[in-house]
Amino acid sequence: MASSTDLSAEAVVSAVRSNLVDVGFEVHPFKIGWYNEYVDKPYVLPYDPDTLAVLVISTPRMFEEAFKPFVCRQHCEGIKDPIDECVAHHFKLVKENFPAIEIEAIHDFELDLNRRPKILVQTAGHVAGAVFYYQRKDVVPDHWSENQKIYGVSVHPKYGGWFAFRGVLIFKTITCPELVKTAPPDVITDRNKRIELLEKYNMHWEDWSFRDIIPVTDKYSEEQKVYFATKPGERQVIVQKIKNSADNTSEQGH
Ligand code: B12
């Protein structure tokens, strides 16, 4: 267990990785200053620019390796969102690993008092060098009418759109002046392809097609797709099925 504040940033990141990678997450360090350079004032995080933060992403494996074991251990009735609770559980385990360090964990779904997201995970993913964030301004010359709102979307080099941002952990007392910034892989360089990506994400996101904009090494299982396509209030049935099939498997094993 890591317990001292004089831990190096490198040691912290490698300990966080060993907590999270085996259960299907990716961990990407960045400096708070890199993030703050891009975002507008209301989103600026109030820390020294060299403060260490890590972005946490869930890969397609997270459903099998973290979520299913989590729901099988828990009484999920009454839990607001089992995926969010599962991620919160794993963030808590990371925090417990560093009792001497003050850590702020910000989930992707958290809002501030003005109902703005507390963290813009796509920008964090870009500055961490993990996933390129394609925005309207990356299509030059512009393609849409002035009053049309086009939301940006991040594309993972291995999983395309088959991943989710889960949040950021900020290690308040750890600075990492030596961390080197790397550019995220620009996997969609062609203007027409960027237009296709942004239109699929903005206009047809429900058909999942934006997620396959590049060839991928792994994607969500059918069961995982069904889970995410189900309205949050109706997901309990699927959770129950996962629990039942785990019970059956363990009975067969005895
Ligand atoms: C609010 C929200 C929505 C809203 C509004 C969307 C929006 N982008 O504003 C609605 C409800 C419409 C929505 C819908 C969806 N969403 Co949504 N949503 C969010 C949420 C919670 C906040 C986004 C937000 O408000 N951003 C604020 C604006 C102002 O940020 P911005 O446009 O990026 O602007 C900043 C950057 O431009 C930056 N900046 C400036 N210059 C530069 C330069 C560079 C180089 C960089 C990197 C940055 C940068 O500064 C600006 C801020 O000052 C995020 C999670 C999160 N916490 O970020 C998920 C998120 C964007 N949603 C996501 C998804 C998947 C969806 C849906 C497909 C539904 C779903 N959950 O399955 C749909 C698809 C969109 C659609 N067609 O409707 C994913 C996207 C994943 C990805 N691959 O990119 C996210 C990241 C959630 C997650 N946990 O993974 N969403």
Image (spheres, rainbow, N blue to C red):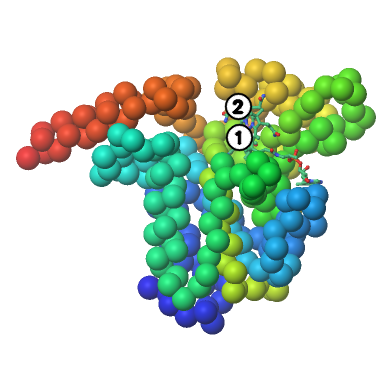
Labels 1 & 2 near each other (Cβ < 8 A): yes
Q: Name the quadrant of the N terminus.
A: bottom left
Residue at the limit of the structure toward the left, as seen here = 254
C-alpha gap between disc 1 and disc 2: 6 Å
Q: Quadrant of residue 104?
A: bottom right
Instruction: Inspect this view and state whether residue 24 appears.
Output: no
x 85%, y 36%: residue? 137
Answer above or below: position of 118 versus 33. Answer: above
Would residue 11 be found to the left or right of residue 99 on screen? right
Q: What kind of residue is marked 1? A: Gly
Q: Position of residue 44 (x, y in %)?
A: 74, 56
Outermost residue toward the front?
113
Residue type at mark 2? Asp
Residue under pointer 2: 212
Q: Position of residue 26 (x, y in %)?
A: 52, 51
First in sequence: mark 1 vs mark 2: 1
Q: Say which residue appears at 7% left-offset and 40% top-offset.
A: 254
Q: Where is residue 3 drawn, in percent x and y?
A: 43, 77
Q: Residue at x 21, y 29 (%)?
A: 244
Residue carrying label 1: 160
Q: Residues within 10 Å of mark 1 (few under 14, many from 20)?
A: many
